[in-house]
């Protein structure tokens, strides 16, 4: 048994005979921590005031737990888009709702912890000196006592209401990463990501339903607009909001590149895509999705000399003459190709239309995992 004495002049033997609070006070002195003021907020246990404070803290934890339950329910049950009955408006509040509930959950967890410290734990004011010495056995015993008194100060062992509601709130917060992982398996996007607004729509464009290609200002795209070796960013000319609440310009899957090859350039079409360009037998114009298949950046830097499309985000390169096959960088899938054709407009000029939707999914590798 050690007979050395702590810097506070107390031996291990004496410490063992002390109450936890006395040992803690000795420990704080030995650590150069001077308690200037310490007062139990409720010296008489079980008063109405104490119970009221306890219920207040528990209420904050309960609100946090309920927000957690709301988060799980919202994650699974809320629609991505919501149409206000009787109006043409569509609202997208799925993400804000999740963010709001998560904020309430964390906020009330914090409020509960602060109120607990302010209302129920002993009021204390301390001043601490710095010291760099290694800990002696006495120090360790005193630290143990300090932790024991700290636990006693929280009132955890006897405040079961707070303990239970804190457990509920903590459990709710712990489910958040779980919800993101498991919930995403329950709530799948379904087929909605497999179509773009280029899909033929006979209601909007009777009788063929073929979607006109337009610029961002809704002007139609004519083959005459492009010089050999140039490119243009185009969109499906669908003004009307689709089921996802977006039109041809605002939908994330829409941006498409029309590329005019230079004279003499020939493409090596991928299987099943031979007639996708225009003219179909000897294509001079090609249309590819602009959304990089690596991580969704716009791949729109076109090098005329090398006929490569570059994505600026992680330097993927797509060989246009091989139907936008990835030849460098992290992208592993070719850019989807849009089957195009031309129609004569009311002004007698030729304009591009989409003969059909893309025949493979747009954008990053979500598809390879499904
Ligand atoms: S997003 Fe295009 S290379 Fe990464």
Image: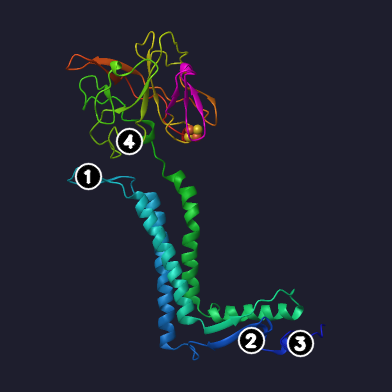
Asked if 86 appears above or below 164 in the picture, the reply is above
Q: With 127 as the anchor, is 274 left or right in this view?
A: left
Near mark 2 (Cα within 10 A), the count class, few <14, some 14-19 or many ≥20, is many
Q: Earlier in the sequence, mark 1 or mark 4?
A: 1
Q: Which mark is residue 89?
A: 1
Disc 1 to disc 3, C-alpha distance = 77 Å
Residue at 76%, 78% (x, y): give it: 137
Q: Are marks 3 and 4 in contact (CB under 8 Å)?
A: no
Asked if disc 4 is less than 8 Å from ligand 1, the answer is: no
Disc 3 to disc 2, C-alpha distance = 14 Å
Q: Earlier in the sequence, mark 1 or mark 3?
A: 3
Residue where numbered disc 3 is placed = 11
Does the magenta run of residues contain 146? Answer: no
Q: Which mark is residue 251?
A: 4
Q: Earlier in the sequence, mark 3 or mark 4?
A: 3
Near mark 1 (Cα within 10 A), the count class, few <14, some 14-19 or many ≥20, is few
Is label 1 in a helix, a strand or a loop?
loop
Q: With 362 as the anchor, is 155 left or right in this view?
A: right
Point out the stretch of residues depicted in magenta: 300-322
């Amino acid at each position: 048994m050690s007979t050395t004495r702590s810097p506070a002049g107390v031996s291990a033997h004496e410490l063992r005979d002390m109450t936890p609070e006395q040992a803690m006070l000795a420990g704080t002195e030995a650590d150069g921590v001077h308690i200037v003021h310490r007062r139990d907020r409720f010296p008489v246990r079980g008063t109405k005031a104490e119970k009221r404070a306890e219920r207040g803290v528990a209420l904050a934890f309960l609100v946090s737990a309920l927000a957690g339950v709301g988060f799980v329910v919202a994650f699974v049950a809320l629609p991505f888009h919501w149409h206000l009955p009787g109006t043409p408006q569509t609202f997208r509040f799925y993400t804000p709702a999740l963010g709001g509930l998560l904020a309430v959950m964390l906020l009330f967890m914090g409020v509960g912890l602060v109120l607990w410290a302010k209302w129920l734990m002993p009021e204390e004011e301390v001043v601490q000196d710095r010291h760099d010495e290694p800990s002696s056995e006495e120090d360790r015993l005193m630290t143990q006592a300090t932790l024991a008194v700290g636990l006693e100060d929280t009132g955890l062992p006897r405040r079961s209401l707070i303990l239970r509601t804190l457990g509920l709130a903590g459990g709710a917060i712990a489910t958040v990463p779980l919800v993101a992982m498991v919930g995403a398996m329950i709530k799948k996007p379904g087929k909605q990501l497999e179509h773009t607004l280029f899909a033929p729509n006979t209601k909007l464009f009777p009788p063929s339903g073929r979607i006109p290609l337009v610029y961002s200002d809704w002007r139609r795209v004519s083959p005459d607009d492009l010089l050999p070796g140039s490119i243009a960013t185009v969109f499906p000319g669908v003004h009307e909001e689709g089921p996802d609440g977006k039109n041809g310009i605002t939908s994330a899957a829409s941006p498409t590149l029309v590329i005019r090859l230079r004279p003499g350039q020939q493409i090596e079409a991928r299987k099943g895509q031979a007639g996708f360009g225009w003219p179909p037998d000897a294509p001079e114009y090609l249309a590819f999705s602009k959304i990089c298949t690596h991580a969704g950046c716009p791949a729109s830097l076109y090098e005329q000399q090398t006929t490569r499309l570059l994505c600026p985000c992680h330097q993927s390169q797509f060989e246009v003459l091989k139907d936008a096959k990835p030849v460098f960088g992290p992208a592993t899938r070719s850019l989807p190709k849009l089957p195009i054709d031309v129609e004569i407009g009311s002004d007698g000029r030729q304009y591009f239309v989409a003969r059909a939707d893309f025949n493979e999914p747009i954008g990053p590798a979500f598809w390879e995992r499904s």
